[in-house]
Amino acid sequence: MEETPTKPYLVRALFEWCVDNGYTPHIAVKVDSNTQVPTDHVRNGEITLNVAPTAVHKLQMGNELIEFSARFSGIARQVLVPVANVYAIYARETGQGMTFEVELAKPATTLAAEAGPLAHFPAAPGESADSDPPKPAGPAGRPALRRVK
């Protein structure tokens, strides 16, 4: 039996830590054909998503997938992110969090079968990237993170 990776557990733990401390958890994601996100909010093949309980609906953080629905520029979207594509989770207010290596995700057909029926929701006309959540400044536009002690 193959050992379950630690990454999904660490993502869930840091999400819970953020929420328990009143911080706004954000995940930084490498976008590829396995991700289902509004394309207008993707910059340089990456997207940062606010996953706070007040910002998302029906959040499910599994070992393979992170799923939720959220509003982007006022339009409800279904979001599907392979955990393998998450390269950071952090608190917006403090920058505290953790970065990860981006692993190769399973093919989209395998992920879709595990997740059930989900539709891909491209960005609607007129949507802009202006509503992207703010990120702490760091090199190459990535979040500036601090070690969690």
Image: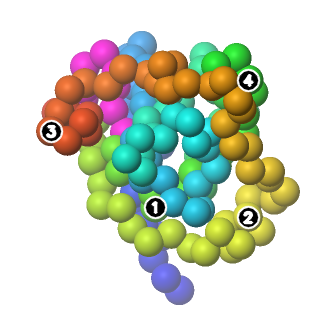
**Number of other residues with Cα within 10 Å of mark 4, as a class: few under 14, some 14 to 19, many 20 or more:** few
| Disc 4 versus disc 2: nearer the observer | 4
- Report which residue position mark 3 lands on: 139
- Spatial distance from mark 4 to mark 1, Cα to Cα? 27 Å
Please state which amino acid type lies under the numbered disc 2.
Ala
- Give coordinates of residue 26: x percent, y percent: 43, 31
**128 or 88, which is in the foreground?**
128
The tag on residue 84 is: 1
Please, what is the three-letter code of the amino acid marked with disc 3?
A: Pro
Q: Earlier in the sequence, mark 3 or mark 1?
A: 1
Residue 22 screen position, x and y as percent: 42, 13
Spatial distance from mark 3 to mark 1, Cα to Cα? 22 Å
Mark pair 4, 3: CA separation: 31 Å
Q: CA distance from mark 1 to mark 2?
A: 14 Å
Specify the amino acid type for callout 4: Ile
Residue at left 60%, top 16%? Answer: 54
- Residue 40, given in percent of the width and then of the height, sits at 56, 36
Could you tell me which secondary element the residue under label 3 belongs to? Answer: helix
